[in-house]
Image (cartoon, helix red, strand yellow):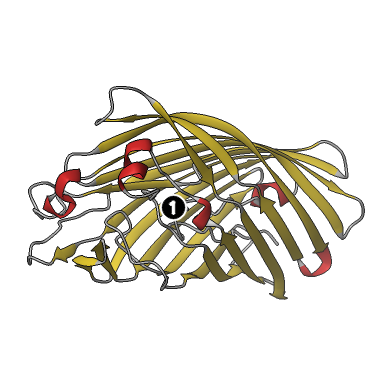
Amino acid sequence: MTLMLGTTVHAGGLDRSGQSLEPLFTKGNLLSVDVYHSSPSVKGTDVLGQSTGQVADTYTQWGFAYKQDLSSQTSMLIMLSRPFGLDIHYDPQQSSLLGGTEARVSTHELMGALRYRWDEQWGVHGGLRMQRSEGNVGFGGLAFGAAHGYWVDFRPSTEPGYLLGLSYERPDISLRIAATYYSAIHHKMSTRENVLPVTTTTSSTSPQSVNLDVQSAIAPSTLAFGQIRWTQWSQFKLSPQVFAAATNGGSLADLEDTTTYTLGLGQKLSSQWSGFVSISYDRIQHTNPSSALRPNNGRVGYALGVSYQEPGFKVTPWLSYQRLGAADITLASYPIARFGQSSAMLFGVKLDYIF
């Protein structure tokens, strides 16, 4: 039974892909391309009663995977993805307190992995990752006082990391349990702050994470699947020289560790058609107040999709609605703005060539 499994999107922290290794477990050789588009609706009201306008920009994600069996026990995977990202912008024509504030973060990752099965049940997998990260942050609006107009540019940094995992399978009941650890990746980014005439260096860490994926047949044509993903976003700090000096070592990023839960069902509808539904959840964070760069707190996501398969080819369109939790924006412990419950609509398609 071949069914499309749900993908975690728009998850906790800056997560946009969930770092799935699903292609590595596909039977046969595989060439896969996937793309999705996100249209968020994130609007708030500042303490002066002014609308912030739409602050979360639309974005398009894409990914590529090539998997090949090297022997009856060994397979390899090459994957190109964009695991993390952020696109926030406050229109200067809207809130006078926050207008002009923005943040852009972009991460690309090339990963190569091998999987070895020493019997029908047990297998190990591991690989290397090469990650490229860059971004910029700017402060605008009266709420930032003397910091109004400050901006910082983090130029591209490319650094290596790794992944390690263990899997257990029971093909007779389509059972698979796979655990994967992704290492932290430490970047040293060439940094330009507009209040300094020289370029400096800023250290940053892409977080370590653990994925636990489970699937099992619960009826002849029905598959249950789920994932628990933990990501140590508290590792992610950005402290450029002038900003850190002005804030006693403060960071532009102040995120908590996240745990994302996903649960779904896949159903085989015919010899060519199958479908899936899933729900995912990120709990509300209570420890840290939200900043203008994080205008939501918690998430519940719903996804559904169908797959059409011919010999050697499969296409999977899908749709997702993400309900984003309300957030109170503060600056130096003073309330600045309130964002009610927000949302995002996502639609995508995945194309698989199996040979």
Please give left or right for residue 131 compared with residue 29 in the image. left
Q: Percent x, y for residue 270?
A: 61, 64
Dividing the image into 4 quarters, which one contains the C terminus?
A: top right
Occupied quadrant, residue 273: bottom right
Q: Is residue 332 left or right of residue 48?
A: right
- Quadrant of the rendered image containing residue 67: top right
* Residue most extreme to the right: 119
Per the image, the residue denoted by label 1 is 14
- Looking at the image, residue 204 lies above or below residue 119: above
Q: Is residue 53 above or below residue 246?
A: below
Helix, strand or loop under label 1:
loop
Vertical order, 63 against 235 (above or below): above
On screen, residue 20 versus residue 277, left or right, reads right
Residue 13: x %, y % from top left: 44, 57
Residue under the image location 65 percent in, 52 percent down: 22
Residue 207 in picture, x, y percent from top left: 55, 50
In the displayed structure, 280 sits above or below 107; it is below
Can residue 81 be seen here? The reply is yes
Q: Is there any visible trace of residue 355 in the rendered image?
A: no
